[in-house]
Image: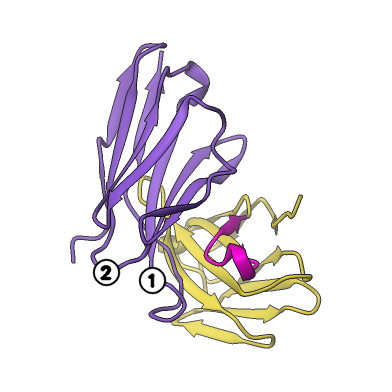
Chain colours: A purple, B yellow
Amino acid sequence: DAGVIQSPRHEVTEMGQEVTLRCKPISGHDYLFWYRQTMMRGLELLIYFNNNVPIDDSGMPEDRFSAKMPNASFSTLKIQPSEPRDSAVYFCASSLSRGGGTGELFFGEGSRLTVL
Amino acid sequence: ILNVEQSPQSLHVQEGDSTNFTCSFPSSNFYALHWYRWETAKSPEALFVMTLNGDEKKKGRISATLNTKEGYSYLYIKGSQPEDSATYLCAWDGGGTSYGKLTFGQGTILTVHP
């Protein structure tokens, strides 16, 4: 299995631009998570999906952030408009529910976003 | 606010030393406690997922224990090697309607000097 695949790996953009991060979870996993990692706050959960349905988006910082999961093999995290304080590494992770696995998260390699 | 706390924040040991660090989490709700190993420039990888009070897990020189009643877990590394240098994260799953939603601690950064 190829693991969780994220793109792009690196993104440098200017303030005000739209940013779209993409994630392909491991086939068969029914949970998908978006995390943001910063020095100040560590790994914080932004939103997670179960069977493509958003379950908890309380970690999404503000309306500029949105996430979708149109099917079981693809999710996007969009920031519009982007701001310098959005600069961080964004991780996508997937897991199997309790019935099918231990619930451990499998992380992608992350997308490093820099907003100038 | 339900916090997951890890200590120490960082640790420097010599090759061959044994070491341990702590993760504390809310004991009021519990489904699982995860430990992840995060090497620089890579993504976190799961070490253990523990669900039962008194659980002990072992993988090579690394082991972990769990006390859900008092809300703590210990991670032990026996005979540390330079390749053990990484950030060790614990994450708490409170279960119930928020099953699968992991709250991570800030991590313990371990540096093993040759």
Query: What is the three-letter code of the residue carrying label 1?
Result: Leu
Chain ID of residue with mark 2: A
Classify residue A22 as left or right of residue A62. left
Q: Quick check: do tags 1 and 2 share a chain?
A: yes
Say whether residue A47 is left or right of residue B13: left
Q: Looking at the picture, tell me which residue is in the foreground, A10 or A22.
A: A22
On screen, B3 above or below A17? below
Residue farthest to the left, as pictured: A1
* x and y percentages locating residue B84 in the rendered image: 45, 63
* Residue B114 visible in image: no
Instruction: Residue at 63%, 54% (x, y): give it.
Output: B105
**Cβ–Cβ under 8 Å for marks 1 and 2:** yes
The residues tagged by marks 1 and 2 sit, at their Cα atoms, a distance apart of 8 Å
Asked whether A83 or B63 is in front, the reply is A83
How many residues crowd around disc 2 within 10 Å: few (fewer than 14), some, or many (20 or more)? few
Task: Label 2, secondary structure: give it.
Answer: loop
Q: Is residue B21 above or below residue A101?
A: above
For image coordinates 32% across by 52% down, the residue present is A108
Q: Nearer the viewer, residue A96 or A88?
A: A96
**In the image: residue A58, left or right of residue A73:** right
Residue B87 visible from this viewpoint: yes
On residue A28, which mark appears?
Answer: 2
- N-term mark: 1 or 2: 2
Q: Which residue is mark 1?
A: A96
Displayed quadrant of residue A67: top left
Q: Which residues are magenta?
A: B92-104
Q: Position of residue A20 (x, y in %)?
A: 31, 30
- Does the magenta segment cover residue B59? no
